[in-house]
Image (cartoon, helix red, strand yellow):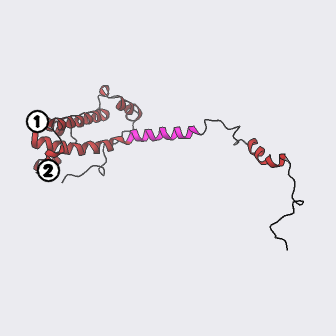
Amino acid sequence: MASIFSKDPAEEHQASVYDKIEGEIAHLKKKTGTRDAPGSTKAVPWIASLVILGFIGLYIMDPFLYAMHRNDAVRAYLYLHNYDGNSSSRDLVASRILSTDEIQVLNQREGSFQDYYASPQAAEQQAASIVQYMNGLRTLHEGPYDHLDRLSWIRYHLFVQTGLQPPISWTFLNSTIN
């Protein structure tokens, strides 16, 4: 008894060369075939997606930077207020990154804040960069627009000038001071 899976070679259909490649020829005649497709159409959606993500990133970058600088401002204020007592801590207060209630709470804290920075100069540099960031943020939102850095100038023309005010901070990102 012969197997049902075996075929007699004489019964097989002898396909011509054209029959073997007929499917490939039909595919190449379609507009989606590789010979007719333009080479740049696959890159356009990726580039457009990156541009859109770049605009979104530029729009929402301030709440993240603000939260980062705010955490650094708490450490710098505690260090400068307790160990150095110079004008850098007053500059941090004047920058309004910390509210007056938070400043009062920080003034009552006791601890070893000397471990936050290696030297008073490092704390002063950190405080100066925070004050510079807050001045740039205030300039972007309130003016004068002549003093903007390059990134803020781009953001001003993309968003503020067109009426879209970028957010400054989100409360859920900011740490609480108890």
Q: Which quadrant of the structure image shows residue 116?
A: top left
Q: In terms of image quadrants, where is residue 11?
A: bottom right
Magenta segment's dominant SS is: helix
From the top left corner, tell me how far across and down residue 14 is, in percent.
87, 53
Task: Report x, y in % for residue 171.
Answer: 29, 50
Query: For this view, does 154 lie left or right of residue 98?
Result: right
Magenta-highlighted residues: 42-59
Relative to the observer, which residue lies in front, 11 or 91? 11
Please name the residue that numbered disc 2 is placed on: 105
The residue under the point 45% across, 41% down is 53
Query: Which mark's residue is nearer the viewer, 2 or 1?
Result: 1
**Rendering coords of residue 64 (x, y %):** 33, 44
**Residue sticking out furthest to the bottom:** 1
Residue type, numbered disc 1: Asn
Residue 86 marker: 1
Q: Is residue 53 magenta?
A: yes
* Disc 2 secondary structure class: helix
